[in-house]
Amino acid sequence: MIQTIAGFDRMGEENAFAVLARATALSQEGRDIINLGIGQPDFRTPDHIVEAAIKALRDGHHGYTPATGLLATREAVVRRTLTTTGVEVSPESVMILPGGKPTMFAAITMFGEPGVDILYPDPGFPIYRSMIEFTGARPVPVPIREENGFAFSAAETLSLITPQTRLLILNSPANPTGGVTPRSEIEALVKGLEAHPQVAILSDEIYDTMIYDGQAHTSLLQFPEIRDRLIILNGWSKTWAMTGWRMGWSIWPNAQKSANLYDKVRKLAVNCWSCVNAPAQYAGIAAIDGPQDAVEAMMRAFDKRLQLVVEGLNALPEIHCAIPKGAFYAFPNISGTGWKAKKLASALLEDAGVALIGGPDFGVLGEGYLRLSYANSEDNIALALERMKAFLEANP
Ligand code: PLP
């Protein structure tokens, strides 16, 4: 009998895609389903970005690009990084990849193997743990607690580091909680990491534009003391509503003393995908350098919806929802309802026509929570909340 490596049997999934498939199937059967499940903006990619891709195709950009990405696209990322973080990185440290996920795959497979510990947020984006399991490394959850504003606790994170720890995964603003880790906590974490020079850091900053309440994003790039062991994950998917384009970037240390990480990810690209599709890379330049009014309008819409979602959730029986500080997710605490989270998520989809995700799909500490993506219209959000209210009143 044929046999594959064990890693594939350990690999997990992202249940949001299964919920999306079920919601689509129910819609096709004629059911009226409101989708608050999938994590993608409900906006179109702004027109000038689409036009840039069409122009690139018309201009004949049909071939391979360098595996690390077009220099012009990497330079656009350098400009954007300077604007958002105040830090000037070299284009030789920027890698263009097909989405944010390939950076996760690259970083985790570079460090993970049996005998190694990798720290990741729980609740957190499910692919972190899945990829760690794939490599055979030991996944060590870093608790992300509601009472701590769904932020990383520097003290608790540092207490989990052992001599076997090789990689620490951070994510702020965060999926699924909407938590933003305050700068003071990041400073304390960076300071503590000085005692653990063997630990590399993967900072997933894909929601960096999505912060509410006028707060500024803190990028791990702003801490030169960890620069030679830091990998930044970012991309176009969320900020410019480009999830289907598969465009991401990462910033790597490129010094010899950094185990040649950049050259390793370049080699991975050569082996796996050669390069990101060329017209999308031109669109990526237009996204960064072009007008940002569509992004700002999207953010204003998310901000308004956030108020609507939080108010609506807090009006539901036995549900409490903390105000999310970033991304476009609410993570209400449903433990007072007596429902198990996954059961409630499934019942809400099947019986009330509201698709959302059970907290346990994001980790052990996700029990007692639901994740709602408010990437949907105000009318649909209001209707979903009405349906949830009616369901919970009828099924306490
Ligand atoms: N990181 C986080 C925290 C996410 O929530 C997502 C997508 O949901 C990604 C990365 C992956 O982004 P992409 O679609 O660009 O691969």
Image: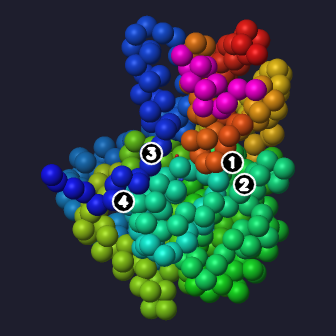
Residue at the disc numbered 2? 144
Disc 3 residue type (three-letter): Glu
| Marks 2/1: CA–CA distance | 8 Å
Magenta span: chief secondary structure: helix
- Residue 154: percent from the left, percent from the top? 77, 69
Q: Farthest residue toward the left?
A: 1
Of residues 188 and 352, the one nearer the viewer is 352
Q: Earlier in the sequence, mark 4 or mark 3?
A: 4
Q: Nearer the viewer, residue 321 or 218?
A: 321
**Percent from the top left, x then y, of residue 360?**
61, 41
How far is the residue under mark 1 from the one under mark 3?
17 Å
Between marks 1 and 3 in the image, the one whose residue lies nearer the viewer? 1
Give the Cα separation between the discs numbered 3 and 2: 21 Å
Quadrant in which residue 282 is drawn:
bottom left
Tell me where residue 296 appears, x and y as whole percent.
Answer: 65, 43
Q: What residue type is labelled 2?
A: Ile
Among the two numbered marks 2 and 4 on one chain, the one whose residue lies closer to the N terminus: 4
State yes or no: discs 2 and 1 in contact (Cβ < 8 Å): yes
Q: How crowded is mark 3: few (under 14 residues within 10 Å), some or many (20 or more)?
A: few
- Distance from disc 2 to disc 4, alpha carbons, whole Å, reads 27 Å
Q: In this view, does 290 lie above or below 87?
A: above
Q: In front: mark 4 or mark 3?
A: 4
Question: Which residue does the numbered mark 4 point to in the structure image?
Answer: 7
* Amino acid found under the numbered disc labelled 1: Leu
Instruction: Give the residue type that dot 4 points to.
Output: Gly
Give above or below for 377 relative to 326: above
The residue nearer to you, when weighing 378 against 185, is: 185
Q: Give the range drawn in magenta.
A: 338-350
